[in-house]
Image (spheres, rainbow, N blue to C red):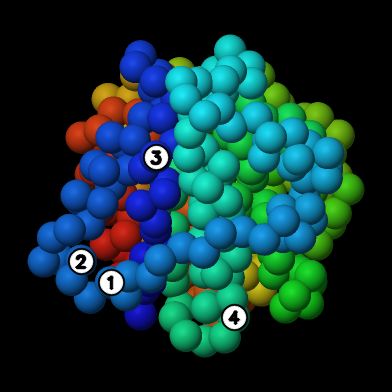
């Protein structure tokens, strides 16, 4: 059984014309999933994340600053990439709330797999800084929720977005209960995630040069990331699912194909089956070419339902 968590509030956050992270992204994702092939998805409205849930990974004064920065009209710029509009706070709270609710559902045995079709993305948001289109780090909030409420001792965050999830790494740099494993293009925004940086055995970064393509991506996961994840034996697999590694994406040039997203999803489900009783929760991060995003999400969710 696979659940889909989403909410109409996630369509209201609008950084404005010319920005890459637009409401049309989520409309494209929902269109892709509005197809007979996905009729068996169990569709659930995402709740708002509680402030207490956000405070597990973000500083209280940072959360208050975000809550207080939403403009009544127009936009408010937090940095050169990261913009708030009317509705942004609810969107970001639904995104993090979706992951927490999905974690609750898989740990209660109500479903094995869940995909959170939400925006804004989250993996660049640090404990006290919005950046890279991200306000609250939804996948990190979900990991912290799993540990605080469900007492899990080993949670994997697997990040196949083309960018490094610097925020997720920062949040769990000192917490070995979380293994953060990321493949990302380098050089590329945000410039973090070098392979040999001394961040302990639970932060696993693997980089790919531009134009690496499918084979190099799959080899990287098979040879370097998946073995570490199997050794860690996660009780829950969380996925930062970004589709901006696709060859059509305007923000990067990793040159992946839609089939690569089916492949990595299948391999992560095998990991979840081996160690986590099949429990896997995925949340949308990047993906900025609408056709590539539709195809990538369809490949990903199709595997989750298989
Ligand atoms: Zn990205």
Can residue 74 be seen from the camera position used here? yes
Q: Tag on residue 232?
A: none
Q: Residues within 10 Å of mark 3 (few under 14, many from 20)?
A: some
Q: Which residue is mark 4?
A: 107
Classify mark 2: helix, strand or loop: helix
In primary-sequence order, the first of circles 2 and 3 is 3
Q: Is residue 165 above or below residue 117?
A: above
- Residue 20: x and y in percent read 39, 22
Q: Which residue is mark 2?
A: 38
In primary-sequence order, the first of circles 4 and 3 is 3
Relative horizontal placement of residue 238, taking residue 203 as reference (left or right): left
- Residue 54: x and y in percent read 72, 53
Q: CA distance from mark 2 to mark 3?
A: 24 Å
Q: Which residue is mark 1?
A: 41
Can residue 195 be seen from the camera position used here? no
Q: Nearer the viewer, residue 196 or 164?
A: 164
Q: Residue at x 28, y 35 (%)?
A: 24
Instruction: Please state the total of marks drawn on the protein image.
Output: 4
Q: Residue at x 39, y 40 (%)?
A: 12
């Amino acid at each position: 059984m696979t659940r889909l968590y989403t909410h109409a509030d996630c369509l209201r956050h609008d950084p404005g014309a010319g920005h890459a992270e637009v409401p049309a992204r989520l409309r494209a994702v929902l269109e892709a999933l509005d197809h007979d092939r996905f009729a068996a998805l169990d569709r659930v409205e995402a709740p708002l994340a509680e402030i207490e849930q956000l405070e597990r990974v973000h500083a209280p004064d940072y959360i208050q600053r975000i809550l207080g920065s939403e403009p009544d009209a127009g936009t408010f710029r937090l940095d050169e990439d990261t913009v708030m509009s009317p509705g942004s706070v609810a969107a970001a709270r639904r995104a993090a709330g979706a992951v927490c609710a999905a974690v609750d559902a898989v740990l209660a045995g109500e479903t094995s797999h869940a995909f959170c079709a939400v925006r804004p993305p989250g993996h660049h948001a640090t404990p006290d800084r919005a950046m890279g289109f991200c306000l609250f780090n939804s996948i990190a909030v979900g990991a912290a929720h799993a540990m605080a409420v469900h007492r899990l001792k080993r949670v994997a965050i697997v990040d196949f977005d083309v960018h490094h999830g610097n925020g997720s790494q920062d949040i769990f740099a000192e917490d070995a209960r979380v293994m953060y494993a990321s493949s990302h293009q380098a050089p590329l925004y945000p410039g973090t995630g070098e392979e040999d940086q001394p961040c302990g055995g639970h932060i696993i970064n693997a980089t790919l040069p531009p134009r690496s393509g499918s084979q190099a991506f799959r080899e990287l996961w098979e040879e370097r990331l998946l073995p570490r994840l199997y050794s860690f034996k996660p009780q829950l697999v969380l996925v930062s699912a970004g589709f901006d590694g696709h060859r059509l994406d305007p923000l990067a040039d990793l040159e992946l194909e839609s089939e690569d997203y089916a492949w990595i999803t299948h391999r992560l489900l095998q990991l979840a089956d081996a160690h986590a009783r099949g429990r896997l929760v995925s949340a949308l991060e990047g993906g900025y070419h609408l056709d590539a995003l539709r195809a990538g999400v369809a490949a990903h969710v199709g595997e989750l339902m298989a």
